[in-house]
Image (cartoon, rainbow, N blue to C red):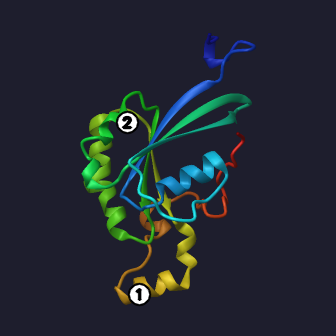
Amino acid sequence: MQRERGEQSPGAPETEVKAVIVGDGGCGKTSLLVAFAKGDFPKVYVPTVFEKYTASLQVSGKPVKIHLWDTAGQEDYDRLRPLSYSDANVVLMCFDVTDSSSFDNILTKWYPEVNHFCKGVPVLLVGCKTDLRQDQEVLQKLKDGRMEPVSRQQVGATSSDTARDRTGVVPSTG
């Protein structure tokens, strides 16, 4: 039972939040969620069809259980993915900072899809693989292809965190 101004009564159950994460296949969605929910970083890439992670945390001193819905970014799942959007409280649109087409797809594919199925739901733009902006091998491959990582300035980023070493990623609490 909620009190006025959103205060919970003593012994109230934790608030539950459904967060859906979308973005191109291989952009880093699953690694971000595993780092957040389990406190680990996946060693190998395994494409996701659908996965759900749950984490408990404190927000302003109150318990919150967050349900993280990991979706497939591949086109083969375009008809299945919308089933994940129902009752979403927030959507994370992810892109790979080392792949400019992944960033371009935010405007051409992901934003239109999310806006259609989740009108009015808050959206967070998340650049994944930011640690690779310093990886000399990745930078050389990009340079060879006359490309460069998507910059914080291009995105208008206000913070930079990395799931690989969990910098800025809330550690798992269970």
Question: Label 2, on which residue?
Answer: 84
Q: Is residue 171 left or right of residue 78?
A: right
Q: Which residue is at 55% across, 57% downward? A: 158
Q: Position of residue 49 (x, y in %)?
A: 38, 48
Q: Is residue 64 left or right of residue 97?
A: right
Q: Position of residue 94 (x, y in %)?
A: 43, 55
In the depicted view, which residue is nearer to us: 129 or 53?
Answer: 53
Residue 90 sits above or below residue 4 on the image:
below
Residue 5 sits above or below residue 123 on the image:
above
Residue 6's image quarter?
Answer: top right
In the depicted view, which residue is nearer to us: 64 or 81?
Answer: 81
Q: Which corner quadrant holds the N terminus?
A: top right
Asked if marks 2 and 1 touch (Cβ < 8 Å), the reply is no
Q: Position of residue 136 (x, y in %)?
A: 54, 85
What separation in Å lies between label 2 and label 1 (alpha carbons)? 37 Å
Residue 105 sits above or below residue 118 on the image:
below
Question: Label 1, on which residue?
Answer: 143
- Answer few, some or many: residues within 10 Å of disc 1's Cα (few below 14, many 20 plus, some between 14 and 19): few
Question: Of helix, strand and loop, which one carries label 1?
Answer: helix
Q: Which residue is at 41% across, 87% downward? A: 143
Q: Is residue 118 visible?
A: no
Residue 37's image quarter?
Answer: top right
Q: Which residue is at 40% across, 34% downward? A: 121
Q: Position of residue 129 (x, y in %)?
A: 52, 66
Choose mark 2 or mark 1, whichever is in front.
Answer: 2
The first of marks 2 and 1 along the sequence is 2
Q: Which corner quadrant holds the C terminus?
A: top right
